Image (tube, rainbow, N blue to C red):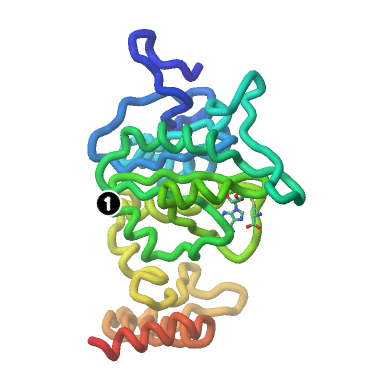
Amino acid sequence: MTEGPQNKPRSLGRKTIRPTLKPRELVTPTPDLHGVWKARVITLFPNSFPGVLGESLTGKALQNGLWQLETVDLRDFGDGRHRNVDDTPAGGGAGMVLRPDVLGSAIEAAQSNASGRWPLIYLSPRGKPMTQGLMQRLARSDGVTLICGRFEGIDERVLAHYDIEEVSLGDFVLTGGEIAAQALIDATVRLIPGVLGNEESTQEESFSSGLLEHPQYTRPAEWKGHRIPDVLMSGHHGEIAKWRRAMSENLTRERRPDLWAKYRNDQNKD
Ligand code: SAH
């Protein structure tokens, strides 16, 4: 099912994913597309990909070769007959830790044909928070390798040895890095030209300008007694732009004083 053509050697543990209407059944290795942004994910649960990334715009773009997704099954690098990947924490304590030797082999296999700008990221609650700025930087790179932890996490030495960036989905603890990896990939892929089919929307949305987005409305003009604000129905583009700007600023000031302070600071610099 997932084997490549007989005459093509398959690299250890790597599967390239291209979604189809039957997500996993029809997953087949695809050739590397030169110059196409690629997410390579080291995980104990390759079946959780493409997951939600196989749907809608990111899924269509994956199918159309605008980006590529490859999983590296950590289990394939496991030790011995049982393909062991974890061990108890040094110093004692609950849970298990992913072994540095096993993870190291998986990382080296994943990075062996990563060329150009290709960050190596560990999804981790200790990491710096994901931001639109990070996604913009990743979208400009050639690809990214993501390490999904499980259990208590990974051996600290791996992080220093491979100079790995730690990135967090937020201040809470997940059972594994896969959901965080999918969030990061989704937010990055939608910035790749052609994926949204509407480039303007990524320039105007929340965070791109340093502000939260203004409220959005659509027909019907009146719903359960609530009307769309008159200005949006007026057809005056200048007034509409002014209203949207004011709403964005108010929302940001009220909800995100941190973003508001940064925005004001950046404006004063210009
Ligand atoms: N003991 C660790 C948590 C381990 S959770 C600690 O307290 O820091 C298991 C795995 O889930 C982690 O290795 C990481 O890859 C992933 N994970 C958990 N929370 C996350 C978050 N907020 N953002 C990104 N990845 C997370």
Does residue 230 show up? no
Q: Decide: is 100 above or below 212.
A: above
Image quarter for ligand 1:
bottom right
Please, what is the three-letter code of the amino acid marked with disc 1? Answer: Pro
Identify the residue at horizontal 39%, vertical 83% (top origin).
262
Q: Residue at x 69, y 46 (%)?
A: 89
- Residue 260 x/y as whole percent: 43, 85
Which SS class for mark 1?
A: loop
The reply to whether residue 248 is visible in this rendering is yes
Q: Residue 206 in the image: x percent, y percent?
A: 41, 71
Residue nearer the viewer, 107 or 260: 107
Residue drawn at x 37%, y 76% is: 210
Q: Residue 212 at what x, y percent from top left?
A: 44, 76
Drawn side of residue 37 relative to residue 183, left or right: left
Q: Is residue 43 above or below residue 130?
A: above
Please name the residue shown 64% across and 29% down the image: 84
- Quadrant for residue 136, please give it: bottom left
Density class for disc 1 (Cα within 10 Å; few <14, some 14-19, many ≥20) is few
Q: Which residue is mark 1?
A: 193
Query: Is 150 displayed left or right of 108 in the figure?
Result: right
Q: How many marks?
A: 1
Q: In terms of image quadrants, where is residue 67? A: top left
